[in-house]
Amino acid sequence: MFTKILIANRGEIACRVIKTARKMGIKTVAVYSDADADALHVLMADEKVHIGAAPAAESYLIADKIIEAAKQTGAEAIHPGYGFLSENANFCAQLEKEGIAFIGPEVRAIGVMGDKIESKKFAAKAGVNTVPGSTEIITDSAHAIKIAGEIGYPVMIKASAGGGGKGMRVAYNDEQAGEGFTSATSEAMSSFGDDRIFIEKFIEEPRHIEIQVLGDAHGNVIYLGERECSIQRRHQKVIEEAPSPFLDEATRASMGAQSVALAKEVDYQSAGTVEFIVDKNRNFFFLEMNTRLQVEHPVTEMITGVDLVEQMIRVAYGEKLSLTQDDIKLTGWAMEARVYAEDPLRGFLPSIGRVVKYSPPEESDNVRVDTGIYEGSEISMYYDPMIAKLITFGETRDLAIGHMRTALDRYYIRGVGHNIAFLADVMNSARFQSGNITTNYIAEEYPDGFNGGALSDSAKKTMLAVAQTVHSFEMGRQSHISGKMNEDAPDYKDKWVITLANENFSSSFFATKDGCSVICNGETYSVMSDWLPGKPMFEGKINGKDVCVQVDRLKDGYSLSYNGAQEKIFIRTPREAELAALMPEKMPPDMSSFLLCPMPGLIVSIDLNEGDEVKAGQILCVVEAMKMENILRAEKDAVIKEISAKAGDNLAVDDVIIEFE
């Protein structure tokens, strides 16, 4: 077996590979850029090598630097993780020449399957169902419009070397096809260094279901069930699960058989994934093959008990698979939620900065956290904004969802925006719980964007009881410190008014032998908790039910987060409540005459001049953030008064780009 491997990646996947390597007794080498000098994967590895500046194009994407690091440290093999060089056939070929093992498939498989156009040809040859479309390389916007019209709208414009939602656009008309080609080409070149684009039919009401395959150098290939990845935003997966709630045994077996046939057609040797689009009648069509480990691989590991990273390492070393198809049994259900540094209330725009507070849920047989950060880590604008993958397991789908809801309540992150409230809201959705999901789920369920988790009646009652208890504990501590209270002091009976969601509730608090009681609007809540002032999470029981509520102290109240909802709560004496009602509401300044940068990012282009007239819907500028290009458009007809930024500028959130007359 290898004695030392280098991980040519960063973040949570680098940490994930290191964990398995440790289990196998293999030493690890981390590579890092300027931005990652103190990253978790660097701290976890046995050795580390600096490879360049923060931009990936100057560090993680430079094959020569990765190879030199391997030589320098004596690493016998390289695990590429996903992204970066993981599906780069030239990199794999270089390693072969240098005598360094690549922990992944052979050059040929990467080459033909990494090219979406070639992969469709091989899929058809292997007897795999394929999506109608054109394998012709698109040359310009006019060509894109012509081909799209021949296929029939809607169409998907895709980068041949793409992945992770980058270089992909859906077009429903000629205008969108032309614009989509331009932006997909630019994004593909910046992300993959390959601007080849093709077009295929976009299947409506689709489900995204993929098959995990595993092959060795001895001709053996097996599949390890499927993953449902239909909850997506901008073609980027957000929530995955295994197995799929939609497939029946016959469809699963057919998809598995076709996936194995394709893997054998290209002599596939490693872990890989064959992705399919599945329509409402369970007709399935080949989408692409990812010749690497997938982000969502943990859900497969949870229901099969197979460590995919270990299998990749063993196959790369030349070992024969110790598993046969009959050994693969799907047991239970697993969910994965991707925790991103982003602001769901602002269109899921990326959030960067320092993670000031970080406390993930405790891991167990039912909860797993794959992360690459720790408290104090910096979320950089140069890389993917993923903070962690939260994975839960249960005997049934309902139990897996229940464990996920509980784990999300216990995930405490401060300092950067995050999408935990959104993830919890999806888990709470009756539609999601029924399994009635497609890749259109987010667009259909949140047509106006995410405006915060719904505050259910039960969540409201929990928040009221917790807020009153927390406040009374705080007041008790202050009184003890000031010497104003002793053990015989009276309880705070009939003294408080709680304001939650613009509604007032009368409240009282009583200490009891086993805990305390809160009476709110005549309803009694029995509360048991060992919470102390300053703790970020209130854990305990309310009327016998386990709860975990995140508590943040505000200047004049509290911010509570629970079950996907976040609310500001104020607790006042009756007189304070009377006075608070008389306070005028502070109105935000009018910024309607400005185009503000909605996210930290790089200005890619502004093709306008001061004095230009613009029409509603017209492109104003393009901002790149977290490796994705974002087109900013005019909301109304206007005249440009002043342009405050230019191409190449790095801007912060709400920096002024353009002022209108």
Image (spheres, helix red, strand yellow):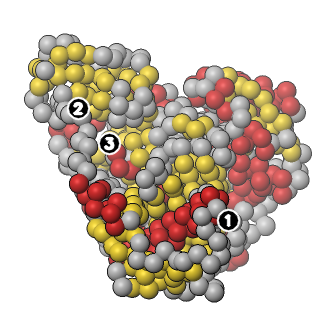
Q: Which residue is mark 1?
A: 362
Seen in the picture, residue 280 relative to 108 is either above or below; the reply is below
On the rendered structure, is 568 left or right of 338?
left
Tell which of 11 and 476 is nearer to you.
476
Mark 1, mark 3: which one is toward the viewer? 1
Please name the residue shown 67% across and 22% down the image. 52
Secondary structure of the residue carrying numbered label 1:
loop
Point out which mark residue 51 bears.
none
Residue farthest top in this picture? 610
Do tag 2 and tag 1 residues touch (Cβ < 8 Å)? no
Nearer-N-terminus badge (1/3):
3
Contact, mark 1 vs mark 3 (Cβ under 8 Å): no
Alpha carbon separation for disc pair 2 and 3: 31 Å
**Residue depicted at 44% across the width and 57% down the height:** 557
Count of marks, rendered view: 3
| Closer to the eye: label 2 or 3 | 2
> Which mark is drawn over residue 591?
2
State how far apart marks 1 and 3 are (Cα): 39 Å
Three-letter code for the amino acid on which mark 1 is drawn: Glu
Res. 430 visible in picture: no
| 57 on left or right of 199 | right
**At label 2, which amino acid type do we have?**
Met
Locate residue 41, reporting x and y percent: 72, 42
Residue type (three-letter) at the residue carrying disc 3: Arg
Identify the residue shown where x is 71% and y is 25%. 51
Q: Which mark is residue 169?
A: 3
